Amino acid sequence: MTRARTILPVGLLAGLTIVAVFAGCRSAHTTSAILYIDEQNYDKAVAVIHEGFQYSDNEPDAYYYLGEAYSHLGEEAVLVDDYPEAKKNYELAYEAYMRALELDRENYAEEVENSLRFNYNNRLGDAKRDWDDGYYEQAEGHLRLAYAALPDSTSPVKSIARMKMQMSAQDTFATRKDELLTEALNLLDEVLAKDPEAYDLQLDKANVLAGLGRNAEAGAIYDELLREHGDDQALLLEIANLAITDGDFARAADFYVRIVDLNEADTDASNDAANGDMLVAAGTWYAGPRVARFEDAIKVLDRATSYEETPRSNTMLMRVRTFYNYGKKLKDEATDTTDPTVKADLADRSKALFQRAVEVGVAMTNLYPTAADGFLYLSMAQVELGDYTASDANFKTYQELSGGSAQ
């Protein structure tokens, strides 16, 4: 750490000298230690308590105040940016507090809990401020001290891992991306060793593995989590993102639609903002040549329009293109078949799709008269319907808008 912050001075012991004497007799050494703590002479307090242990080492009072002295020494070390010293003293404080609980949990449980939380929360507070300000090294130091102060909580380790994940996505750390993600992965494994069923940690681990390009491992974790948390939209989005990375656009589209279904089914309108964009993306993937699920594309693109008070150019273009390409596909199938009944049915369906392409194309070019591709698909659909005059006019407009280059 390289930056110190002001922390609460001597607040840990406010009122401690008037705490009632618990069961048993307090030794003279412990009484002296309390006075030294009040005088902020923490090294002397530690020394006198250890001296008292030569006569008796089973006094809960002594261990509690030993923990207090070490806690203050830890805070003093933080103020001068001496991380190793701070870590050592927080660990010693924790050991002392635990020993006090072993000897007299009934009387010391609340006092020890308050002291541990004081140390822990102080360091977490400093970590948050440093993290927010982009002082990642200092933030990690405070988080590690929080873990030393309260090793029963794995939250600081999780936070360090997530901070490194965040850093890895920033251009500033582009050259260290794999290094940061590997460090995050190691930290997550450390915490998962204590809590292997932690869902959020498993999700983080899968995300890190995906970031490292270990997609098969990430996918295995996602699939396992999906069996138990199939309604978690964050999980579904991560699976969709992995599918995009893998080039599995049909799977990505399926998960986008699933997320929208969940958004529409709940009562929280605030999560509906991205629904339209997700449906357009899903429809575009469904209609692409690698997937060619045109019926699904038409359904989700039609749904997308319900989120647009004024139809957007991109949504309308995807609809025109989907109707046209699906019509062409059915027309080709009709040409290839020898069954007259099937041929007639495919021809009728193809014609209906070209007609829908014209309808949406006309609406689009009226609303967006500078959208070149709208005129192109409108023109091509009109050719399929035999309306050559309108097709020629719209194709000329397309050429004018696009500078004469076909797209």
Image: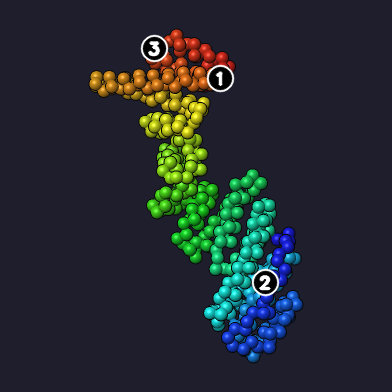
Element type where label 3 sits in the image: loop
Where in the figure is residue 119, as x and y percent of width and height?
A: 64, 68
Mark 2 vs mark 3, CA separation in Å: 87 Å
Precedes in sequence: disc 2 or disc 3:
2
What residue is disc 3 on?
386
- Identify which residue, 101 or 4, lies in the foreground: 101
Crowd class of label 1 (few under 14; some 14 to 19; many from 20; radius 10 Å) = some
What residue is disc 1 on?
370
Task: Work out which quarter of the rendered image holds the N terminus and state it.
Answer: bottom right
Q: Is residue 301 left or right of residue 36?
A: left
Q: Name the kind of residue labelled 3 in the image.
A: Gly
Mark 3 vs mark 1, CA separation in Å: 25 Å
Q: Name the kind of residue labelled 2 in the image.
A: Leu
Q: What is the count of numbered marks? A: 3
Give the residue drawn at x 65%, y 63%. 123
Q: Is residue 6 above or below residue 163?
A: below
Q: Is residue 363 above or below residue 304?
A: above
Give the residue drawn at x 68%, y 88%. 28
Precedes in sequence: disc 3 or disc 1:
1
